[in-house]
Image (cartoon, rainbow, N blue to C red):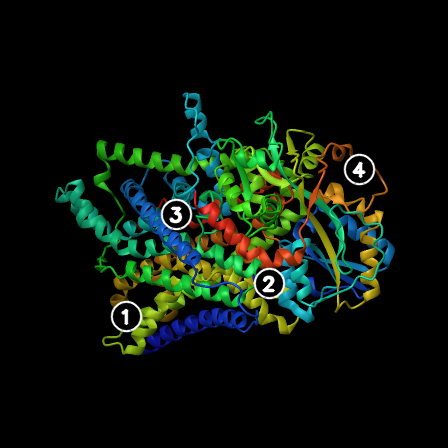
Amino acid sequence: MRKTLFSLLAAAAALSFAASAMAEQKTLTVYTYESFTSEWGPGPKVKAAFEKTCACTLNFVSVEDGVALLTRLKLEGAGTKADVALGLDTNLISEAKATGLFAPAGIDTAAVKVPGNYADDTFVPYDYAHFAVVYDTQVFKTPPKSLKDLVEGDPSQKIAIEDPRTSTPGLGLLLWVKSVYGDKAPEAWAKLSKRVLTVTPGWSEAYGLFTKGEVPMVFSYTTSPAYHMVEEKTDRYQAASFSEGHYIQVEVAAMLKTAADKDLARQFLTFMISPGFQDIIPTTNWMMPATTPSQPLPSAFGTLVKPAKTFLMGSDEVAKNRQAWIDEWLGAMSAR
Amino acid sequence: MLTTAERRRGLAGGIAVLCLVALFVAAAVSALLAWDAGASSSRLFSAYTLSVLRFTLLQAMLSTALSILLAVPVALALARQPRFAGRVWILRLMALPMGLPVLIGALGLLGIWGRQGLLNQILAADGRAEPVSIYGLSGILLAHVFFNLPLAARLMLAALERLPAEYWLLSTGLGMKRLSVFRFVEWPALRQVSGGIAGLIFMLCATSFTLVLVLGGGPAATTLEVAIYQSLRFDFDPPRAIALAFLQICVTGLVLAAMTRLPVPETTGTTAGRRLQRPDGAAWSARTADTLVLFAATVFLMLPIAAIVASGLKADLWTLVTSAIFLQALRTSLEIAAIAAALAVAASLGILAGRGAVADMKHPPAVARGLSAALGATSALVLLVPPVVLGTGWFLVLRPWGDVAPYAPALVAIINALMALPFVMRVLAPAVETHRERTSRLSASLGLSGWSRLKRIDLPVLARPLLTATSFAMALSLGDLGAVALFGSSDLTTLPWLVYSRLSSYRTHDADGLALLLAILCLGLAALGTAGRREVGHD
């Protein structure tokens, strides 16, 4: 028994040492979220494309999601090995700035075209998508046409949503309802709660319930149907277009003050908004590119919902009110 | 009946385990407390916290009571029919829920009990318009029973099987009725273990996270664990997280203390170690009743698993199994699980040695009694320390020494070992204590000690509980996502992590396939843990 234990410990140690032994070449370390670096995510292709142009090694370190990414940077502080953080969303920017860890990008971002007039000198957008209710066309012939329709619709037709306490889409829906209903948001939530089948901790759980057929609507993105059309060749799942407009999620990246080679980091950010990176995004990250890509998007993207109006709250406003609005949400949702 | 040296070694072992566990937890907690989060933005003891606490305790108590009550007939039936075709497979099946990532288990349950599940399809075909909804407290209870009934039943069965085989012969010889057998033989044995099992299940349910959110139907169903996760992940307010964790440990600890303080009579008896036979189970009526109970339990457990298998088979399993990332995740998962299991078993043996040494003293001094109590509490309460707290805390502890990534596998293994400790203790403690009662005098009079005692007396009897405990711990570690999620980096990919990562990039089919593979792996481990089960009793 003891012998096995030792050999296992030795194996684990060997595994770790192998990981820390790195190449001597110039390296750029990018912290990002897990689905970015997974084998179908943009990560592998981005790495190959960037390494061709930079004579360097691009290292991804991935954590669970954008929130975990910021937490990780807070934990590491000025001692972080990250040169670039990629994958924060606009709601986190205020908090991210407060850490004082980030440096202005200092690159030309004129090519970036993101709805909702987002602009920042530090955090550069690389993709976006509008939040949307995605529904199963085999169940719904007439999907809700507006947020009001969703709130006031037939309570026997259920939706799965995410929890704003634990997930970014959950927070997105909270902000969307707040943007549309303002002070009347609690009443809207009280009504909507009758339609809510369940509130999941994250997007994956809700979407899992949806694709298993347990619930005919889920809170997701306008781009979700593109995945099913391109990868599964089915147009069964569609996003509902809401007449009030849609709330947007913009994903951004920024350079850290402590970046070892600032020029290399800047080179990466420039690459990030160039076609070499942007062409990869749509069919790997399933988001809309932040600049005009060099090739036309797959035809499936042409059929996606294009919101007439975009909602986006300033991240300072979100940071200031988040707790109060979550409390309000808890009150309205728990009352049913 | 221990020699002075043995007693000293036992005490040293107990103290060492206690110190190591305490140090590991304290280091994480103090690192988090030292973190300056600025002014904590939200009040700790708000009406919200109180309602969350109330719900946490309510659902945990109901879940525990239901799991235990429903497990009793299952354990009794399994014990009364020691030899029938497929028995060992029912036992192995019971090890499955524990090794499944909770989300997969939840989706499997919904495949049967959900709005579009089997039950509602049958009801709809029968002309019922409105589907039966389990979301809310009922869904949470259903899921907790699904995950914990098998655990309770297995542990109770072990207690029944430890009873001397002579008891059953004697009770038949005396012509005892079913009720009398239960009252005088089975119940005392179950009572001895049920407090501990209830405590274990209570902790699991009180700290339940994903199940409660997914099946609870809304934020009214929230546990303290959710609040801790939120304050550490989303708000990044470590002192608040620690305060909530303390609240969780204190309140749950109080309930546990009340639960385990029920007086427990000793039921060990001497035995000639004859082959276990249950003449009382041979009657036609007994066989029918037991078959019905086991059939119902198997169907209840099997249907959700069948749903998981059915969706898993839709995946391209061959491509999955041969992909490099799967093989890497498999290797990492098995390594972590093996180390975690070894650590948990070693720690349990240390704790048992310490407690054994104290129990052996005629008049143990207060310090020794304190040590024994502390050892008991450590092994019971460590499950209440949220892995997210341990992980984040240790991240801060290790930070000054450079990159944390190389330590991540070791940390995950240690955290998994701590989580498995209470399970391993539930398996090993009764076995070791009963064994010691039965053999210590004999070994002492034969002058057997140390290695030869271990080889000739202990291992032949304890090998099986040790194996069971190891497979328990490994399954638990294999199914655990929590500890890994914190460190998540491309170097540390485990199987549950892979399942979630597939789910988070739309690849549901792959996730289903991976979940099926994970289930097969757990079944394999369970087979390992129940190896030789056919040989009930020792010939």
Between the C-alphas of marks 2 and 4, the distance is 40 Å
Left or right of residue B344, residue B70 in this image? left
Identify the subunit bearing mark 4.
Answer: A
Q: Quadrant of residue A142?
A: top right
Q: Measured from the top left, where is residue A132 in percent x and y?
A: 64, 39
Q: Which residue is mark 1?
A: B359
How crowded pointer 4 is (Cα within 10 Å; few <14, some 14-19, many 20+) is rated as some
Q: Is circle 2 on the same chain as circle 4?
A: no
Instruction: Please name the residue that numbered disc 3 is placed on.
Output: B148
Q: Residue A46: x and y, percent?
A: 78, 50
Residue closest to the eye, A305 or B21: A305
Type of residue at label 2?
Answer: Ala
Q: Residue furthest left?
A: B174
Q: Are marks 4 and 1 in contact (CB under 8 Å)?
A: no
User: Where, by quadrant of the figure, is residue B266 drawn?
Assistant: bottom left
Q: State which mark lies toward you, 3 or 4.
A: 4
